[in-house]
Image (spheres, rainbow, N blue to C red):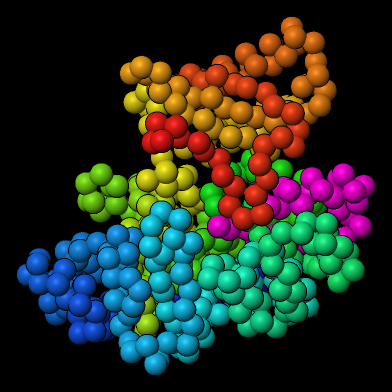
Amino acid sequence: MQIFDPEYECMPREEIEQLQLERLQATLNRVYKNVTCYRNKFKELGIVPEDVQSLADLSKLPFTTKEDLRLNYPYGMFAVPLREVVRIHSSSGTTGKPTVVGYTKHDIKVWSNLVARFMTGAGVNSDDVVQIAFGYGLFTGAFGLHYGSEQIGASVIPMGAGNTEKQIMIMQDYKTTALVSTPSYAVTIAERMEKMGIDPKSLSLKVGLFGGEPWSESMRREIENRLGISATDNYGLSEVIGPGVAGECGNKCGMHISEDAFIAEIIDPDTGVTLPPGSIGELVLTSLTKEAFPMVRYRTRDITSLDFAPCACGRTTVRMKKTMGRSDDMLIIKGVNVYPSQIEDVLFAVEGCEPHYQLVVDRQGALDTLEVRIEVTENIFFDEMKMQKAFLDKVEKKIDSVLGVGAVVKLVEPNSLPRAEGKASRVIDKRKI
């Protein structure tokens, strides 16, 4: 199994932690000197960078949140003058002011290497043709995978998002071997290929690198079966670097975090207390190499856990499990915590369900209600009422037994739910409207 950067990806645990401490201390000095927000946060807690003498002291430091980034919009969190920033990205800003992030020339180089690591782990090499079906623009996803592919020496097709039939034509004509997209868009591509009568085996595709949204093991199997590829997961977020924080190797037993570039913690999302290894909680990341936009204890809001056990691939870095959802996207229904990915697993286990669904949460009086709209195959949708009722009962009982909360299941025709070329919109919470 190929490893792009064995010096750092296979470093002994003691050396990793020593390197992390050295880079952490340098980062803290940089932000204390150059970022007013951090200097004020440290002073409020009576902390100076010199107080951090071990990795255990990290818990003394304040968290950074997306609200900090919005309050310091656009450039208040930059740790270098704007003249040293060669690239600016930002979030969509759909919930208010966008979060703006910057990169120096060195940051771009580091970013390229980090993405090349997980792409190599997934099986991409210099002989591959990589088709990127992320949207190019302020979103970091497309550029990150683009840089990583070029760093490996692969050929890049910067296709961008959408125009599904053209995507498929390019795959056929250009002999694409690796697909980059959201997992939900990969399913959309598979569906369109089936309608066009195209056999995935006639393509050159061998691997998919999917990110940008949480997805389940059931969806992985769905993508692999329908496209005939190895589907791998990767993780990143713009506020920290973009894609490149972590990614799966061929063993698919968790995403290897590049620990020379990030310190990962798991905290209780309610109390902020750091949890012991193996615990499920909110992922917090501290960047160790970013020059333009370093982040100290950034609360990702993503729920996962960390596994420090050795991996058979030879990499020694800690692995994060697939994200279960987000602490701020978590649905609390009748006092029960529910993640869309849990319902997705239930639906994939029921024969006749298509991989498209939508959750509608509402409130009747003082009681929460959950409606699960699922696409089903045509034979199920047009079955006689008795058989359809039996199918509904089966799905509702399965959801209740797994989640501990009742739901009303509504069957909808194939292709009737909205399709996404980017992140899938799974939840409509009418309680917030």
- Nearest the viewer among 414 and 284 is 414
Residue 222 locus on image (x, y percent): 71, 43
Residue 417 locus on image (x, y percent): 67, 37
- Residue 282 counted in the magenta span: no
Determine the residue positioned at 53% across, 24% down: 371
- Residue 188 counted in the magenta span: yes
Q: Is residue 257 above or below residue 404?
A: below
**Side of 230 relative to 303 (left or right):** right
Determine the residue positioned at 82% across, 62% down: 166
Determine the residue positioned at 20% across, 64% down: 62
Span colored in magenta: 184-212
The residue at the far left in this view is 46
Quarter of the image holding residue 265? bottom left
Determine the residue positioned at 41% across, 35% down: 433
**Side of 236 relative to 99 (left or right):** right
- Nearest the viewer among 126 and 342 is 342
Residue 15 locus on image (x, y percent): 36, 77
Residue 316 visible from this viewpoint: no
**Side of 58 relative to 401 (left or right):** left
- Nearest the viewer among 250 and 31 is 31
Residue 375 locus on image (x, y percent): 70, 31
